[in-house]
Amino acid sequence: MSATTPEWTPDSWRSKPIKQCPEYPDQKALAKSLAELKKLPPIVHPREIVKLKEHLRDVAQGKAFLLQGGDCAELFDYCQQDVIESKIKLLLQMSLVLIWGADKRVVRIGRMAGQYAKPRSSPMETVDGREVPSFRGDILNGFHVDERELDPNRLVKAYHHSAATLNYIRAAISSGIADLHRPLDWGLGHVRDPALKAKYQEAVTFLTDMLRFMQTIGADKSHNLDTVDLFTSHEGLLLEYEQSLTRLLETPSVPGTPSKKEYYDTSAHFLWIGDRTRQLDHAHVEFFRGIANPLGVKIGPTTPASDLLDMLRTLNPSQEPGKITLITRYGASKVADLLPAHIRAVEDSEYRQTVVWQCDPMHGNTQSVSGGIKTRSFSDIFSELQQTLRIHKEQGSYLGGVHLELTGDAVTECLGGSEGLDEDDLSTNYTSFCDPRLNEKQALELAFLVADHYRCERKEKLGGA
């Protein structure tokens, strides 16, 4: 069924079963917040959404690479200049490395300006011997145990923090934060492995020499060197919120062609359906099948290969290239057994080369260490990504992107990496209220490792030519 059929409306999801749905005790206050949201202007514009769809079409066809990253659970407190800037700079630096390695344009999407909700396995948890509602993200309740009751006023706060964050992203980019004339910190002092350090140094030397050469010949005068596109995304978990920001708007079209209107979820450019809410006959799939935004779907160990085609036919019946991003997240020990069948189910169908294949090597590799601290091993993260790259190459498909939980800060939440963080280091600067994130050095290291894979692949092709 398509978005234009009468069977779909912005509230048709309410007739379906739903998971991860908050039950607000104060329905009157909820209604007031939702009414306010419906009156507020869109956070993003259809023209921006259409532009992202065009970029993702290029990714699906192997012409570009998608870098998506940001916090696991964004906090209202992250709506600060330095926090926003550090993420922008990290995504820019990672994308330069990926351009060097993959020799393709990089599409950047931040898990920013709206990633305020998190699905939880249990509605309750025990804190200091006291049973309290689980923290479900700032859009629903607070992390402090005295703020765990669901508060519908937070829906409106989420809107304003999203709008303020995106406003500053746009202002920072238009003011030159992405200007390649500015020096970047390529410090490699933390890298202990000599072979790895040599590979990094090769990339850094190339990038700095390239920028210097462009300055010498005057090519750096191009306005394209001082600005970039950075789109926003979040998991579309709270359908009350998403529906309130969904508007019937005119789709930007080529002059001379008939105009049309479509439903856009204006809370973000890109939204994804999580692993816990992707049931075909449930509310989340019903809602998202009707909106014009590009969509992601998390695919994990519990996803039957037979479900993939039904999902694609429901969410993208017109087989629009780049409309759907399949975000795979299995775990390093399971990816080799599960990914090939998922690839074949899609690539042997009418959806061949229409989806964006994206690897999320984070969520399937979460573990707990002493004291119940949640962490992830960098070696597991890299192993899943490395295996995913290899399997796509063997299957003749294209891994078009990575989806990472990261921060531009020097946190100590994931084990390993070239810094060699171990369990004793986790307490140094563990600040996440939810899942562990890569710090800026680990994230950049992962970008170098992906870039190296593609450079080696290109050398192989040139050698065999």
Image (spheres, rainbow, N blue to C red):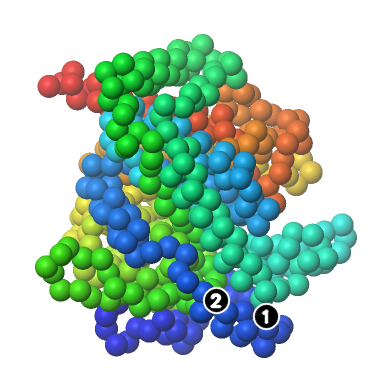
In the depicted view, which residue is nearer to us: 255 or 448? 255
Q: Is residue 364 left or right of residue 251?
A: right
Q: Which residue is mark 1?
A: 24
Label 2 vs label 1: CA separation?
17 Å
- Secondary structure, mark 1, is loop
Q: Position of residue 301 (x, y in %)?
A: 46, 55
Q: Which residue is mark 2?
A: 37
For the residues labelled 2 and 1, say whether their Cβ atoms are less than 8 Å apart.
no
Which quarter shows the N terminus? Answer: bottom left
Residue ID at (51%, 11%): 194
Disc sitting over residue 154 in the figure: none
Kind of residue at disc 1: Tyr
Q: How many marks?
A: 2
In the depicted view, which residue is nearer to us: 378 or 332? 378
In the depicted view, which residue is nearer to us: 207 or 177? 177
Q: Quadrant of residue 250?
A: bottom left
Q: Position of residue 354 (x, y in %)?
A: 23, 56
Q: Is residue 430 left or right of residue 48?
A: right
Q: Nearer the viewer, mark 2 or mark 1?
A: 2
- Residue 123 visible, this orientation: yes
